[in-house]
Image (tube, rainbow, N blue to C red):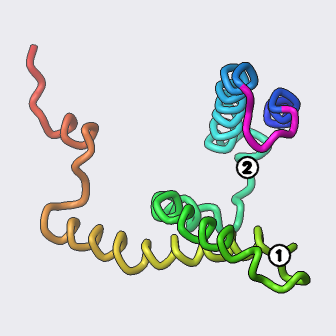
Amino acid sequence: MLGVILSTFIFQGGSVARFWPAVFGYPFLSFAIMLIVMAGADGSSLIGRYPVPGASALAAGAYSLYLTHKIPFHWVELMRPHLPAPLQWAAFSLAIVGAFGFGAALYWLVERPFLKLRDRLDGRSRSSLAVAATLPETA
C-alpha cells in the first residue's frame, strides 16, 4: 500500500503525467499493485486471510468492465455541462455507476452465455496448462 501512496507523489497530482513521472511512476505503481495482488493471493498474508465481499464477482466481470468503462465516462463528460449545477458534482459517481452497469450487462448478456456455450461444446478448459497435462511425456 505504501508503494501506491508513494506513486501518487511521483505523479504530483496531475491528471496527465509528464514525461519522467510517466516513465518511472507507472512501472513503480504497477510493481506496488503486483505486490498487493501477490499478498492477496497468499492465504497466510494479512490481506489474504479474509475474503473481500464482492471481490470474486468483480474479478469475474473485470474484462467486461474493462471493455465498456470508456463509454459511460465519455457520455457523462459530454453531458456534464448540461446537468443542473447541483448534479455536476456527482458526474464521477454517475460515470462509475454507468461503467458497472455496462460491464454487468456485457458480462451477463454476452460473456457468460458464450462461456457456457463453449463449455457445452468443447469442454471446460483450453488453457495451455490443461493441454500440457493431457499430452504424453517424451523422454
Quadrant into which the N terminus falls: top right
> Is disc 2 surrounded by few (<14), some (14 to 19) or many (20+) residues within 10 Å?
few
- The mark total stands at 2
- Range drawn in magenta: 12-18
Query: With respect to residue 81, does 70 lie above or below?
Result: above
**Side (left or right) of 31 relative to 136:** right
In what element is the residue under mark 1? loop
**Residue type pointed to by label 2:** Arg
Q: Mark 1 points at which residue?
A: 90
Residue drawn at 65 percent across, 71 percent down: 78
Q: Where is residue 41 in the image (x, y as percent from the top left)?
A: 61, 43
Q: Nearer the viewer, mark 1 or mark 2?
A: 1
Q: Which comes before the other along the chain, label 1 or label 2?
A: 2
Residue drawn at 9 percent across, 30 percent down: 136
* Nearer to me, 23 or 138: 23
**Residue type pointed to by label 1:** Ala
Which numbered dot is residue 53?
none
Residue drawn at 74 percent across, 74 percent down: 80
> Is disc 1 surrounded by few (<14), some (14 to 19) or many (20+) residues within 10 Å?
few
Most extreme residue toward the front is 82
* Nearer to me, 87 or 48: 87
Quadrant into which the C terminus falls: top left
Task: Name the quadrant containing residue 82.
Answer: bottom right
Q: Name the residue under label 2.
A: 49
Residue drawn at 68 percent across, 68 percent down: 77
Can residue 124 be found in the magenta stretch?
no
